[in-house]
Amino acid sequence: MKKIILLFSFIVVILISFIENVSATTFYEGDYIPGDYIKKEKNGIKKYKQSRFIRVSNSANVAYCIEPWETLDTNVDYNEFERINNLSDFDKQKMALFAYYGYEYVDNNINHSSSKWYTIAQVLIQRQADKESDIYFTDKLNGNRITKYSDEIAELENLVNNHFIKPSFNNQSFNILKGDTITLTDANNVLEKYNIDKSNNFQLAKIDKNQISIKALDVGEEKINFTKQDNNSLDNPIIYKSPNSQDVIAKGSMINVEANINLKSFTGDIKLFKFDNDNKTCQNQGEAHLEGSIYSIYDSEYHFLKDVVIDSNCEAKFDNLEAGTYYIKEKKAGTGYEQDKTTYKVTLDSNNPSKTLTLYDKVIKAKIVIHKKYGNKIRKDYKNESNALFEVLNSDNKKVGEIKTDNNGLGKIILPYGKYTIKQIEGLKNYQKSKDIHININKKTKKVITYNLFNNEKIFKLRLYKLNRYTQKLIKNNPAIFTIKNNDTNSYVLNTDNTIYFKTNNSGVLNIDNLSIGNYTIYEVKSPLGYNLNDTGINFSVSEEDIDNNNNDYIFELNYYNDKIVKAPNTNVDQEKKNNKIFLSFLLSTVSLYYLLKYLTKTDVSLIL
């Protein structure tokens, strides 16, 4: 409803034309309309009557009362007026429209020739004129309120509300490709009420009540008008006012309603971009040249139209094309490129008047596959390495691509003509990088080249010297046993026999050849025989930089000292040994004396003793 009000408010020329200082007009009451009874109520006052025609004197034209509580005096002369107190322009417009579309309105499937339409129009006009009054139908004169003519009232209100509604595409602009046809659909469903102007550049035709087709015949711009015209030959509607009688409105013709659209017709084009299939740019590869490629265009019947040549910017354009379907093929490829055998179908219409084709030509190329593994060269425990990154450099040492390995250790790239160096720039920490790969792609090169790359762990050798702390000499032929703890992993290093123990050789040296970069502590768990155990441990570390600075052949040397065991004298044991010697000496002396005396005296020596 708000939209309707806005539409009415935009009407600059008020629907009702008024003429001042004309001859007086009188009205008379005509026939009663059978069965139509009307009652009015306002502020406790009631008024009722049977509906009857009001006509202009000396004419068959009907008029309608617009002051519900005033009486029509048929003897009063009326003057034509421009304004009426307490009625807005909007109200006057609606009352005039109710009168126009009410009694005697006939159009297509609408026929308001029945007298009931006079009653319906009169009720709606008075309701519009006096919104505070309750005006309704009754079953008889001064009877009870009834619901009557609901469908007819809705029909009349719909005609009035839609009168100034224009086609939904009113005042819009449309661009149409030459030779194309567009269809406009009126969402407001009023197109059938409008006539269409003729055009030189465009062919316009109504498809049905709600659509119109427009075909662009030539290039140009034009404004097309749509006009809603009154088919009845009536004068303008007039509101009559008299201070001594009921004010009335006489039915009249309608002011024309106009709409328009702006049309522009033009030609289309197809633009070509010719790129290298590998780098997807205008950059030539090797000695190949994209410039100079020739393309031909054909119409929908495959009739040849013309050629274009790809320029130094890798572009060309087919222009001045009408709507339709076209076929485009490469007639000649640029130097060093394979000819594209594909036929491209392109359709131009008003929604897509310009199309762009991005075309690619292929050079001779090879697929480079890298299978990257990492591990320990001694243990031979190689695994696939992911995320190893290689950069590809051309003969000018300019980076042209990258290769990155996946979870299977595989990476690949397709390279065109030329000489390249493949250099590893990223890999696992503490592992060696691959040596550079040099390759020349030419006609003799295989289509697929695979490189199996094994990157070894960066390891170092530990050389421990077992020394006598006092003499600073190696403890030879007397092995010591050690364990080595990796502090980064909190685990012990395993020997080749899968134990954690390492033993010095006969030269007093311990050699371990396969240690990973990290932080360690070495402990002595068994000392050489005759030496005290040195189990305090020694911490040492080796970094990646240490190994890199020594060309991956780094020996970490370590001195491990032991003190020789020194035995202290035992006082009690020595005294006992001394006593035993004295006793033995005494015993030997006594025996010797016994036999001497016996020999000298020849007697029993025991008696002497």
Image (cartoon, grey):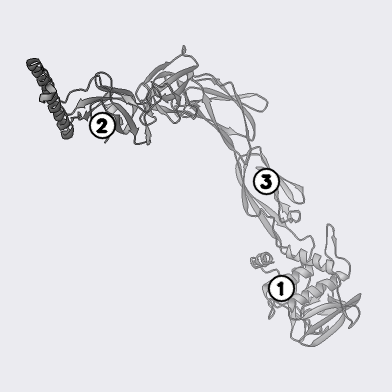
Q: Which of pointers 2 and 1 indicates the residue nearer the eye? A: 2
Residue 404 figure quarter:
top left
**For the residue carrying disc 1, how many other residues have a C-alpha within 10 Å: few (<14), some (14-19), or many (20+)?**
many
Q: Quick check: 60 above or below 386?
A: below
At x 30%, y 32%, the residue is 523
Q: Nearer the viewer, residue 488 or 283?
A: 488
Distance of mark 3 from mark 2, alpha carbons? 115 Å
Q: Quadrant of the N terminus?
A: bottom right
Q: Which of pointers 3 and 2 indicates the residue nearer the eye? A: 2
Label 1 close to label 3 by CB (< 8 Å): no
Horizontal placement of 401 versus 103: left or right? left
Q: Nearer the viewer, residue 142 or 388?
A: 388
Is any part of residue 514 visible from this angle? yes
Q: Quick check: 111 above or below 404?
A: below
Find residue 101 and report its horizontal and vertical position in percent: 79, 66
Secondary structure of residue under mark 3: loop
Horizontal placement of 339 versus 80: left or right? left
Q: Give the residue at mark 1.
A: 92
Label 2 close to label 1 by CB (< 8 Å): no
Label 2 sits on what residue type? Leu
Q: Nearer the viewer, residue 535 or 322?
A: 535
At x 14%, y 27%, the residue is 583
Q: Quadrant of the C terminus?
A: top left
Label 1 sits on what residue type? Lys
Label 3 sits on what residue type? Ser
Distance of mark 1 from mark 3, alpha carbons? 37 Å
Of mark 1 and mark 3, the one earlier in the sequence is 1
Q: Give the residue at mark 2.
A: 533
Q: Give the residue at mark 3.
A: 199
